[in-house]
Image (cartoon, rainbow, N blue to C red):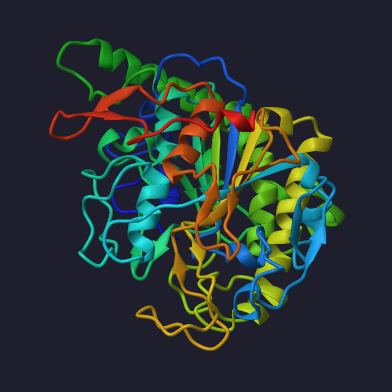
Amino acid sequence: MLSIRGMISRRELLTVGSVGLAGLGLPDFLQRQAQAGPAKSRAESVIFLYLQGSPSHLDTWDPKPDAPVDIRGEFKPIATTAPGMQLCEVLPMLARQARHFALVRSLGVKPKGLSNHGASIYMLLTAHDPNNFTPTGLAVPPSREDLPSFGSVIARYRPAERGSLSYAALCFPVREGAVSGVGQGAGLLGGTYDPFPFYDDPTGPIRAEAFTLPPDTTLGRLQARIDLRASLAARPGLGPKAFDGYYGEALSLIASAKARKAFRLEDEGQKQRERYGLTRFGQSCLLARRLIEAGTRFVQVTWPAGSDTEPAPGPDGSWDTHRNNFPMLKNWRCPVFDRAASALLEDLAQRGLLEKTLVVAVGEFGRSPKIGAPTTNNVGPGGRDHWPSCYTALLAGGGVRGGQVYGASDRNGAYPQKHPVHPYELIATIHYALGLDVATEYRDTLNRPRRLVEQGGPIVGLF
């Protein structure tokens, strides 16, 4: 079980069963998720499909059939259910769901340092400029000095209702090299707003021990312990700060069993599970839908391979295709993503959830237009390099009008040509959909005011 340094791991949450006096348990985790009431919004929840490693936008969302052969690549464009929108042929299932989603084809940024993953990840996930990276843009281990991820910001300013999780992180941690958790935690906001991490492989049996009482404990017995804690906390000088009403919230979460039931993927039936794909990513997308149904506010499903992992065959391989881009996408990456993402959108729509659930899919950048061009980033035959200057994001639900293309890249997919969008504006759009004011400020460790996003506002034309 992997956990981000300074964050609450699932193993640590297991202590809730005994509510140990010295341990860190679910009540403490819930205490850290306190906040004022919910805001009016277009969306009630968000599923963020983070494709770390970054797929080639030219070979997925933004085909360039009229570009030179060493730019347009091997894949042909196909029509979709949205008039005028084309995708590459490796996404046929998503093409049938195009009426549900919008594409922003004009994302672009110049990260600090070299165009490596770390700085771009930090900028995307925190909506702020990186200030703790090496001169080459490589990541350093996360700390409480970091600015918070936008998922943690959502947990802070738009928490879930009592008895539900505010921020869950599924499938795999955000990872660059040996560093896990880049831009994913609450940072200086504190452990209050860290995600509940679940990185177990959901294709196997899932045990949700964090929400289950041990065999020798009943709800009544647990309630008695909580009442005792409350009475101790009421006496001057007795009881730690954690002895408070949040233990009652922990009891409520266990008693309601909503979260525990969400992890019971076997209740879906084999046909439904196969619809999403019997892969780590596919089953994580199915789990994300179930968590949303259980009242979770924000779910991040991170692609199950590190951002700079060598691409290899298999369903869990990397999007970082410095070489063999086309066979990797055609045979592995795109079929896995296509099946899972299309099933998620269709399933949410059929259940009446898409209207209230914003789904966003994006990587930290795109891939270079020129195929196999030798660069400092070690591009090999048939590969595409890092390319933060232009890429694409998919948005669906939560008030976003489906079937539209916002912005455009140039003839070679190298730079935004129409309506350029900074990634901070993408995050501002997520906040906007949830009813959050991006001008809201909090204080960093030096008591400086920080906005929810460093600069820019939402893409209101999507709604």
Residue at point 87%, 56% (across, down) = 271
Number of marks drawn: 0
Left or right, 283 with reference to 376 = right
Q: Quadrant of residue 189?
A: top left
Left or right, 117 with reference to 255 = left
Residue at point 74%, 59% (across, down) = 87
Residue found at the far bottom of this picture: 381
Residue at point 21%, 53% (across, down) = 132
Residue 90 x, y percent position in the rendering: 75, 68
Relative to 423, residue 293 above or below: above
Whether residue 186 is visible to the viewer of this picture, yes or no, is: yes
Whether residue 294 is visible to the viewer of this picture, yes or no, is: no
Residue 119 x, y percent position in the rendering: 33, 57
Residue 55 x, y percent position in the rendering: 57, 65
Q: Nearer the viewer, residue 159 or 235?
A: 159
Q: Quadrant of the N terminus?
A: bottom left
Relative to 11, residue 24 above or below: above
Q: Quadrant of the C terminus?
A: top right
Q: Nearer the viewer, residue 108 or 288?
A: 108
Relative to 108, residue 59 above or below: below
Q: Quadrant of residue 399?
A: top right
Residue 64 x, y percent position in the rendering: 67, 65
Q: Nearer the viewer, residue 327 or 414?
A: 414
